Amino acid sequence: MKRVGWAAAALAAARVLIWDPSVRGQARDAAQVLAAARDGLGGEKNLAAVKSFIATGRTRQLRGDNLVPIEFEIACELPDKYVRRDEFPAQDIPPAVNGFRGADAIGPSKTTRDEFARLMLGALAASFPSFPLTFKYSAEAEAPEGKADVLDVTGPSNFSARFVVQRETHLPVMLMWQAPGPPARGAPPAPAEHRLYYADYRTVNGGVKWPFRLRQAVAGTTIEETTFDRVSVNAKIDPKKFETLK
């Protein structure tokens, strides 16, 4: 596999954000920002009508000095059924399946609910009873694209992040959180800033806008890029997809 040349230039460039904490406590609040975001993503009526979706696409993941291609399918029945199946065409290993059904885990991953929450913030600007989130207005930010509103987000299992919504388009553009970074030689992983960027919003069936490109960076270096090929809203899903693994 080719060594990494992909994490340079635009793919590794982080947006510059300048915080303005003076707006704390002013007229804007979290509920107002979320309502505007849901309007930008297709409107409350269209988003409330989303009961399920199937999404397929490709991920390129940085592992060491190599890029690992992954082909995935995500199946979700809101509010509490979610599963992602990853296949690795360049490696002779079985598919990885992770998710949850209600309180039951599907697969070994302990971070699936966090991943579900991050995707739902970018796609629907909402949380669900399976992983309830609390929002608080944090600050106004300046970025090359213009002003943005920043919300502090907290949830179960010490979930904590900052959610950035562009003010002009009302679309989510980024989520930031602290977590261990890549392990250093001879030392445990140190905390690092993780950023998930939402981009390339397109309207899918049902009138909902979906971010067709996701990019995750750790300490300014891109470690993963995801491209959705197809998103089907309110698709009928085989119940077997949500069976727990034995």
Image (cartoon, rainbow, N blue to C red):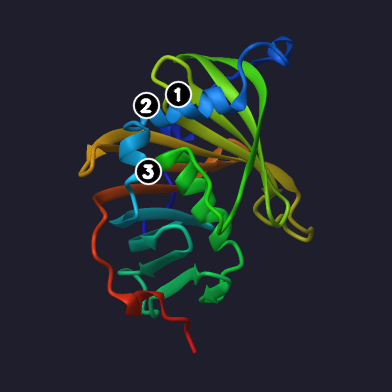
Q: Residue 74 versus residue 53: which sits nearer the camera?
A: 53
Mark 2 and 1 residues: CB-CB less than 8 Å, in contact?
Answer: yes
Task: Return the residue at label 2.
Answer: 40
Find numbered disc 1 in the image and state the secondary structure of the residue it sits on.
helix
Q: Is residue 190 above or below residue 217?
A: below
| Nearer mark to the viewer, of 3 and 2 | 3
Which residue corresponds to the image point at 55% horizontal and 59% vertical from the top-left? 130
Which amino acid, mark 2?
Answer: Gly
Which amino acid, mark 3?
Answer: Ala
Task: Return the residue at label 3.
Answer: 48
Q: Residue 135 versus residue 152: which sits nearer the camera?
A: 135
> What's the CA distance linking mark 3 and mark 1?
14 Å
Which residue corresponds to the image point at 54% horizontal and 58% vertical from the top-left? 64
Residue 2 appears in view: yes
Image coordinates of residue 90 in percent, x first then y, are 33, 69
Which amino acid, mark 1?
Answer: Ala
Which residue corresponds to the image point at 51% horizontal and 29% vertical from the top-left? 34
Image coordinates of residue 45 in percent, x first then y, are 33, 36
Q: Which mark is residue 36?
A: 1
